[in-house]
Amino acid sequence: MLVLHIVIPLLLASALLYLFVLWRPNTVERDIFPEAKRGKKQKHVLFVTAHPDDECMFFSPTLAALSRRPDVTISLLCLSKGDYDGQGDVRKRELLKASVHFGLTPDSVIIVDDPHLPDNPKKAWNIALVAKTVEAVAAAGDVDAIFTFDHIGVSGHQNHIAVYMGVKHMALTAQRFKMHPLNVYVLESVGFARKYSSILDTIFAMGTFAVSRESQLFVADLQAYSTGVQAMMMHESQLVWFRKLYLAFSRYMFLNTYSKIN
């Protein structure tokens, strides 16, 4: 009875809401930039990730949406080359190929190869080093907005969480950004059921969006979803069976919800 009277109507409403947002995308459009930067002709957005393929698996709806805006330049800072299995050089090349699908050039993709920032869920990253690295890139590129992980890091990976902690530390303490403001958005982590509910999570994503005026929601249409899948196909070394299922069922291929932390 619970399934018949509550679950099925909820799922149907979520699917219809997804279609409505595709029909009226302005429903979920909000300015992502600081008020002081809104008059800037060409704005700069930086994505900060931990490993090659994070950009596809977690941020592709946002990347696809922003890549369509002629007034936005996108850069990607990946804080490791993904060398956990000894394939770091392969994964660097894969990331560069994947980034092309989001309109990024090789010059706009920065891949850090630092022994103090290893791809290893059992080794803690130095938060101050993460903050310093991100600050240097953000300052050099006059970045206006940053998108990265939240305190759970979607999957709970310690490197993802360290990225969040470093970016947050930078945003709240760096003196430069008091004079030259930038907005920092962190990707909402959700539970297992929502994570693998695809577009059926739309109703909950809209709830997150409605709660705060500073939250952001990006919804991928079929073209944007296809872009994300094609980009992920470039990460051939990572295409094991469960990641292929992820591409089909993960809400992160269709929906990105963010909170602003600064």
Image: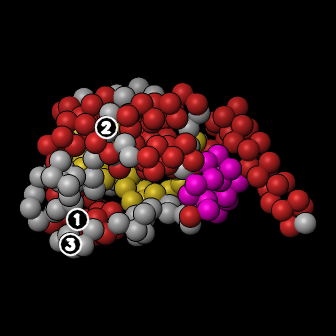
Alpha-carbon distance for marks 3 and 1?
6 Å
Residue placed under numbered mark 2 in the picture: 236
Question: How many numbered discs, if any?
Answer: 3
Residue 59, position in %: x, y?
43, 47
List the residue tagged with mark 1.
Answer: 120
Q: Secondary structure at mark 3?
A: loop
Q: Earlier in the sequence, mark 3 or mark 2?
A: 3
Most extreme residue toward the left is 115
Q: Position of residue 157 (x, y in %)?
A: 35, 66
Q: Tell me the chief SS of the magenta region.
A: helix
Query: What kind of element bears circle 2?
Result: helix
Residue 23 numbered mark, or none: none
Identity of the residue drawn at 44% across and 62% down: 154
204 inside magenta stretch: yes
In the foreground, 77 or 115: 115
Q: Is residue 30 visible?
A: no
Q: Amino acid at mark 3?
A: Lys
Tell me the residue at 25%/37% (across/down): 94
Q: Are marks 3 and 1 in contact (CB under 8 Å)?
A: yes
Which residue is disc 3 drawn over? Answer: 123
Q: Which quadrant of the view contains residue 96?
A: top left
Residue 82 image point, x, y percent: 22, 52
Q: Amino acid at mark 1?
A: Asn
Q: Earlier in the sequence, mark 2 or mark 1?
A: 1
Real-space Cα separation, disc 3 to disc 2, in angstroms: 25 Å
Q: Which quarter of the rendered picture does the N terminus lie within?
A: bottom right
Look at the image and give the residue range highlighted in magenta.
193-213
Q: CA distance from mark 2 to mark 1?
A: 20 Å
Indicate whether residue 6 is drawn in magenta: no
User: Vertical placement of 70 versus 89: above or below?
Assistant: above
Q: Check the image and report above or below for 53 versus 183.
A: above
